[in-house]
Image (cartoon, coloured by chain):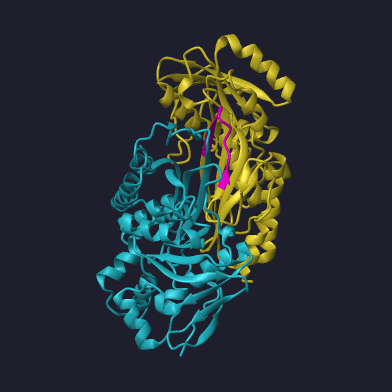
Chain colours: A yellow, B cyan
Amino acid sequence: MSEFELIRRYFSDLGAARADVSLGVGDDCALLSVPPDQMLAVSIDTLNVGVHFFPDVDPASLGHKALAVGLSDLAAMGAEPVWATLALTLPDLDLDWVHAFALGFGCLADVYGVRLVGGDTTRGPLSVTVQVHGLVPQDMAIRRAGARPGDAIFVSGTLGDSALALRLRQDGKEIPSELQQRLDLPEPRVALGLHLRGIASAAIDLSDGLAGDLGHILEASGVGAELELKHLPLSPRVAEAVAESRDWSLPLQGGDDYELCVCVPPDRIEMVEVLATTLGVPLARVGWIRSALGIEAHLPNGGRSLIAARGYDHFTAIHPG
Amino acid sequence: MSEFELIRRYFSDLGAARADVSLGVGDDCALLSVPPDQMLAVSIDTLNVGVHFFPDVDPASLGHKALAVGLSDLAAMGAEPVWATLALTLPDLDLDWVHAFALGFGCLADVYGVRLVGGDTTRGPLSVTVQVHGLVPQDMAIRRAGARPGDAIFVSGTLGDSALALRLRQDGKEIPSELQQRLDLPEPRVALGLHLRGIASAAIDLSDGLAGDLGHILEASGVGAELELKHLPLSPRVAEAVAESRDWSLPLQGGDDYELCVCVPPDRIEMVEVLATTLGVPLARVGWIRSALGIEAHLPNGGRSLIAARGYDHFTAIHPG
């Protein structure tokens, strides 16, 4: 048996057993059953060494994160996770590393009832591509294009923690463990996404920063938004960093949050607030949709400022006050 | 608009329009419909620069090949291609390169009625991961595990052309255009695969060489095989190389053929021979399945030799005669 075959063995039985998998890892294709009343939702994402993670990344964390990123996309769509495929490019055959990666991937897959059904292992610079597959009843998927003027905008969890962790690392400073965990082990908001079916008018997961990702909803829906910056949900560390620097780029343009940004019609706002309490998911109301295009921020000092609807590609810090 | 957004535009409308795509590129997930009587077949494959292709690869050829490799897996399963996703990692933003890549990918997608429904574009060393999605009626998929003693073994097309092209390049020799084309622009045997539903007992696509890939069928089916080397289908160039060197490794262990290796029960052999004629696909009968494990080669000189059921991982040349 070759080392590559050994590695494949680590991936031959990962995640939850599922009756809808007729054939999993080990043939030319996996064979899968989609129930007749459900649509298939799919999303593919790549994480590259030196771009999306550091070379010294903990392999179990990388396995977790590579799957979590995709599950977050399913959550934003209101889709129930079912299967994943994995294309893993490795520079060498470090069996301990692969074992740890598979553990991280497999544990998260177990938690969400996901089965790894196929994959490819190749040689090259370290890179992980995962495709996730979910199910959502016909016409119940939450799309980006459904936001309407008057809708409230909610954000789950807290914003900017991963970006602060990255900034501290780049500055050579110590990273508090709660920030490191947000960067390394994001928890996709799967339960929230499922319960937002039939409630949310639009949703997106926050991978490139609130301004850019909300901008995708606005563009798809042909609307604009106003944000109350003082209502952005911030952890104590990020709140402190924003207060010290008077720079809102951490929560507005920071990436890797993997929280949900959700638009909700006025008559369903109360329903969403009850839902958040029931699920135990922090959900902050941060603004509203308007018909005028663009994102206008209400600054804590009472001023207003237009925010560029951009994420990582075109980083634009705003310095209110 | 950022350059990455420009690149995404090249991929927003690739391949055939399909009514079963409710939502394609541009949201958190694609939304797809699978007919109630069909199973979903999926396969994911990665091609990395310096491993699977040369840095000076023609981008249109790479786009073609990245999709063809997946379609070949669907063909081996008897699945009808429907959708693809693409994770493309680029070292820089060369718009001309990306445009050509998208053309190559899109043309092949059009030919086979495939729609590109999602993707991810990231920075890093050049790498292409494609997941293909196909449909196959319940219980009609052709698996690796169905070969039985007495089945005939057929191989489509010719073997070893891509491996010879690679060898010539590595030796710094000129590559005849017909070999270069086999390496760069493989044609997946989709029509053949679809027509083998209900006829073939097992099939696999030849990506790592006949010995290794047939070995996967044998392992999954718990059987062995005998091969008549003089019946292996060889192009004139490969036949010449084998005759000169008396080395059968090109057709037996050469990769990148993307032909089908198919097992057929005795009572359906005639049906398959008629099918090959009808489809205009060359199909050579190269051996048969036996109950004794291992692959035994009948050499042209009348001798016999056991062949290692291995592909690229453990390259073992055999020197008969």
Instruction: Classify residue B92 by image quadrant.
Output: bottom left
Q: Please check the rendered image and state whether residue A71 is part of the magenta-colored stretch, yes or no.
A: no
In the rendered view, would you say B67 is above or below B207? above
In the rendered view, would you say A117 is above or below A222? below
Front one among B16 and B287: B287
**Residue B84 at x, y = what percent?**
44, 45
Furthest toward the top, the residue is A267
Instruction: Classify residue B271 by image quadrant.
Output: bottom left
Front one among B206 and A55: B206
**Residue B218 at x, y = what percent?**
58, 67
Q: Is residue A236 visible?
A: yes
Please name the residue shown 43% across and 35% down the image.
B24
Q: Magenta stretch? A: A31-42
Instruction: Classify residue A242 by image quadrant.
Output: top right
Please name the residue shown 59% across and 18% down the image.
A199
Please name the residue shown 40% across and 16% down the image.
A292
Residue B124 lies left or right of residue B291; in this view the side is left
Q: Is residue A233 visible?
A: no
Residue A86 lies left or right of residue B275; in this view the side is right
Total count of labels = 0
